[in-house]
Image: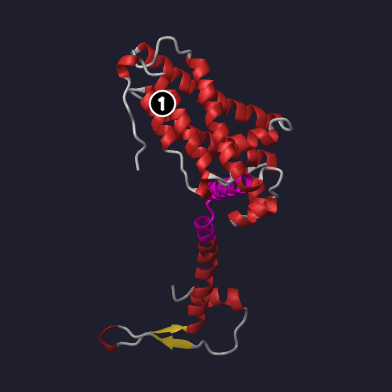
């Protein structure tokens, strides 16, 4: 190994005419071996060349999280669209709210429209499933389940200020963009179908009146619910929704089979 050091140093520095500087390193039992200082520098340079780029790449890989970036974009887009409408929201506002660059946005979504479609497919559809479809799917009594869902609607003014995100987009974009129209129509269709299926099952179990048409009742309830949400938004008045809630619960109670009728009170 001793014979290789001069050649290695020469390869890095060229010909040397000055004496090799040595650095004393504390050793065992008071022995202080010395190592050429240039060799230490060479070792540092070589190790640095090998390790630094890897460390930098590892750091970047740790900071970058494409899935989280996509989720931030979706959440920011949903909030801005719900507040200002799709046409009233510009990309810069969404990017600023999400803390994401335009390049990162285009990595996930080809256009503002594609981002808007994803908001409908992944956020608004999910909200509808969680609030309506899943509770109705496993409901023992569909009337009780529907009343519980309606009573779970927030009465906080802040939550009612912007109205229903699904209905807002359907009203704004259905006549302008086929992509939005078909997506919002699909969610409304699934919502109505879930109510109708629950009422149909309830009728078979003698919990719903035998003369009730599940499809008609489902369409009426959906339209009534969205109508009262829109009234509360337009008037900025929670009392409008409270009145609607009372009317919808009265309607649902009328759908019960006589033997299953009970009196319910809204939980405080």
Considering depth in this image, is 112 or 212 the residue closer to the camera?
212
- How many numbered marks, from 0 up? 1
Q: Secondary structure at mark 1?
A: helix
- Indicate yes or no whether the magenta region holds residue 60: yes
- Indicate yes or no whether the magenta region holds residue 75: yes
Q: Quadrant of the C terminus?
A: top left
Considering depth in this image, is 49 or 19 the residue closer to the camera?
49
Residue plotted at (34% across, 87% down): 32
Q: Is residue 126 above or below residue 65?
A: above
Residue 143: x and y, percent? 39, 24
Residue 150: x and y, percent? 44, 33
Mark 1: few, some, or many residues within 10 Å (few <14, many ≥20)?
Answer: many
What colouring style does the render use? secondary structure
Residue 164 seen in this snapshot: no
Residue 197 seen in this snapshot: yes
Outermost top residue: 211
* Left or right: residue 62 compared with residue 116: left
Q: Which residues are magenta?
A: 57-82
Residue plotted at (36% across, 25% down): 139
Residue 136: x and y, percent? 41, 26
Q: Is residue 77 above or below residue 7?
A: above
Q: Quadrant of the N terminus?
A: bottom left
Residue 155: x and y, percent? 47, 44
Q: Is residue 228 above or below residue 27?
A: above
Residue 24 in which image quadrant: bottom left
Q: Is residue 2 above or below residue 141?
A: below
Outermost right residue: 176
Residue plotted at (44% across, 87% down): 23
Residue of label 1: 136
């Amino acid at each position: 190994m001793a014979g290789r050091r001069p050649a290695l140093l020469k390869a890095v520095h060229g010909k040397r005419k000055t004496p090799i500087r040595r650095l004393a390193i504390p050793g065992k039992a008071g022995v202080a071996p010395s190592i050429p200082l240039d060799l230490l520098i060479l070792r540092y340079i070589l190790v640095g060349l090998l390790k630094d780029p890897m460390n930098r790449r590892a750091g970047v890989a740790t900071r970058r999280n494409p899935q989280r970036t996509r989720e931030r974009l979706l959440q920011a887009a949903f909030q801005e669209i719900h507040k200002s409408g799709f046409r009233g929201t510009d990309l810069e506002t969404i990017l600023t709210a999400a803390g994401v660059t335009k390049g990162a946005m285009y990595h996930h979504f080809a256009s503002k429209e594609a981002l808007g479609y994803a908001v409908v497919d992944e956020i608004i559809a999910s909200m509808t499933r969680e609030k309506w479809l899943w509770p109705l799917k496993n409901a023992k009594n569909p009337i009780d389940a529907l009343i519980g869902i309606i009573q779970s609607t927030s009465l906080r003014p802040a939550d009612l200020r912007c109205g229903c995100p699904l209905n807002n987009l359907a009203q704004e974009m259905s006549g302008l963009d086929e992509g939005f129209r078909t997506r919002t129509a699909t969610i409304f269709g699934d919502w109505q179908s879930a109510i109708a299926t629950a009422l149909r099952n309830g009728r078979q179990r003698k919990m719903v009146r035998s003369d009730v048409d599940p499809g008609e009742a489902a369409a009426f309830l959906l339209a009534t619910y969205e109508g009262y949400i829109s009234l509360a938004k337009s008037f900025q008045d929670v009392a409008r929704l409270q009145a609607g809630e009372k009317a919808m619960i009265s309607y649902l109670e009328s759908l019960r089979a006589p033997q299953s009728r009970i009196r319910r009170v809204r939980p405080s």
